[in-house]
């Protein structure tokens, strides 16, 4: 079957993101974020884990009642009680998905579940069969997939697809995967499983080695996955998940290479990032791709000069396209005359001659040696000091 070139963006900020130690959110806060995710036009919002707590149950229910444009999803372990709870919380949703999972790696089966592989296989199939009674949109994840044995994975995934799973999500639960290998594993699984094309394949990558975005893209390009699970600001258990803003902007910026489309309204990215950061109290590092304060800031004279001549010289995407009001020329000791002159113009300061500009630029450089960043107020003061001295 030929693969679609539409990629599904599945956001799990409210579920896996909340698993970041210290990132718990109230029901109202989760609803605010869910509405922003809807504005961002994510395809699926994983709103929580209904059986985990009464609070999570209530949050999912309220999101299910208020979100109309995105599918709302709840996580559940592979047992009837969890699944029934997920279905109950999702009842008000226009479009609902149940996401059920069970671990399939030898380590997790032996040490955590204390179950035989045959029991895990049976439980996975029964869970999907039961979930199908509540909705026909069922996602199944073999937890710790990237450390599971392939033959066993094939049996489990073929079994759950036969029971009606419509999305197969392949998780790199502990961020152990590396890109080419991860993509190739998904490709082999899809080739070996006879009914694999009855489901959409998905990737869910953790960032323990800083490879979550790269692994997700390899899962798509090499493996043929058509759903990416991600979170705003890369929030998530331990080192976090694939960052939505990074993976979406990689696909957009390199569209000619990927030839894949996403439904995301990228101009809502910065608002989503700021909201999640404010609510969780997790600051975004200044040099964070796309949403960091410095992501579109230029400090060196050579770069500033290039940007003022043509933004493409040092910008691969537009700040405005992800929701910043503009890019930023930061004036400091590395800045050149051109950037300084431009700022004078923006501030409405007119100089009578080039000699005057040069003199002001000299004073600016002196100040910049003493002060890390020069603000507009500093420039105004610098110019008015000179006027007073004349
Ligand atoms: O990381 C993981 O394996 C998960 C699953 C529940 C999909 O979050
Ligand atoms: Zn996860």
Image (tube, grey):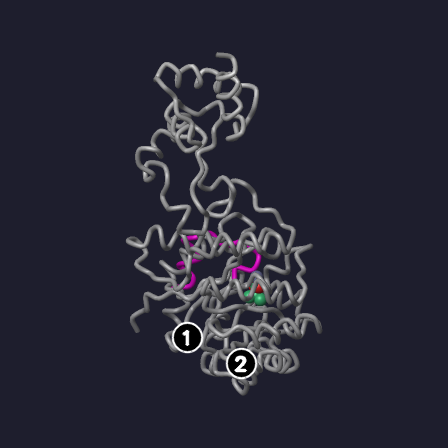
Which residue carries the number 1 mark? 199
Label 2 near ligand 1 (CB < 8 Å) = no
- 94 sits left or right of 77 in the view: left
Is label 2 in a helix, a strand or a loop?
helix
- Image quadrant occupied by the N terminus: bottom left
Residue 242 % position (x, y)? 50, 55
Which residue occupies the foreground of this view, 303 or 376? Answer: 376
Asked whether residue 70 is drawn in magenta, I would say: no
Residue 318 % position (x, y)? 38, 46
Q: Reply above or below: 386 against 314.
A: above
Tell me the quarter of the picture where residue 50 sits. bottom right
Mark 1: few/some/many CA within 10 Å (<14, 14-19, 20+): many
Is label 1 in a helix, a strand or a loop?
loop
Tell me the quarter of the picture where residue 372 sits. top right
Residue 26 % position (x, y)? 68, 64
Asked whether residue 180 is drawn in magenta, I would say: yes
Residue at far bottom of view: 133
Which residue carries the number 2 mark? 128
Where are the magenta residues, as a range?
Answer: 171-187
- First-in-chain label (1 vs 2): 2
Q: Residue at x 45, y 68 (%)?
A: 43
């Amino acid at each position: 079957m030929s693969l679609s070139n539409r990629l599904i963006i599945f956001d799990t900020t409210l579920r896996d993101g909340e698993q970041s130690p210290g990132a718990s959110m109230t029901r109202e806060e989760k609803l605010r974020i869910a509405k922003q995710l809807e504005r961002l036009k994510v395809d699926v919002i994983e709103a929580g884990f209904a059986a985990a707590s009464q609070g999570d149950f209530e949050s999912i229910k309220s999101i299910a009642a208020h979100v109309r444009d995105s599918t709302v999803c709840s996580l559940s372990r592979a047992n009837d009680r969890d699944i029934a709870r997920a279905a109950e919380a999702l009842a008000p949703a226009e479009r609902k998905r149940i996401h059920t999972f069970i671990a399939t790696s030898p380590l997790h089966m032996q040490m955590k579940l204390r179950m035989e592989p045959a029991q895990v296989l049976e439980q996975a199939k029964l869970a999907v069969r039961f979930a199908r009674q509540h909705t026909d949109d069922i996602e199944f994840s073999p937890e710790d997939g990237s450390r599971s044995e392939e033959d066993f994975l094939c049996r489990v995934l073929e079994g759950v697809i036969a029971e009606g799973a419509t999305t197969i999500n392949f998780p790199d639960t502990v961020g152990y995967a590396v890109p080419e290998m991860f993509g190739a594993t998904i490709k082999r699984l899809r080739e070996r499983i006879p009914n694999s094309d009855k489901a959409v394949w998905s990737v869910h990558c953790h960032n323990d080695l800083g490879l979550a975005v790269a692994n997700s893209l390899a899962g798509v390009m090499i493996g043929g996955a058509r759903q990416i699970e991600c979170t705003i600001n890369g929030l998530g258990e331990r080192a976090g998940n694939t960052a939505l803003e990074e993976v979406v902007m990689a696909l957009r910026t390199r569209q000619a290479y990927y030839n894949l489309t996403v439904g995301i309204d990228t101009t809502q990215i910065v608002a989503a990032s700021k909201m999640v950061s404010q609510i969780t109290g997790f600051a975004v590092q200044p040099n964070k791709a796309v949403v960091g304060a410095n992501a579109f800031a230029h400090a060196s004279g050579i770069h500033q000069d290039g940007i003022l001549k043509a933004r493409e010289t040092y910008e691969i995407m537009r700040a405005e396209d992800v929701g910043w009001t503009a890019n930023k020329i930061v004036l400091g000791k590395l800045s050149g005359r051109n950037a300084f002159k431009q700022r004078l113009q923006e501030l409405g300061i007119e100089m009578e001659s080039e000699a005057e500009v040069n003199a002001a630029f000299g004073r600016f450089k002196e100040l910049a040696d003493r002060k890390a960043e020069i603000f507009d107020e500093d420039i105004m003061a610098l110019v008015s000091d000179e006027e007073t001295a004349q």
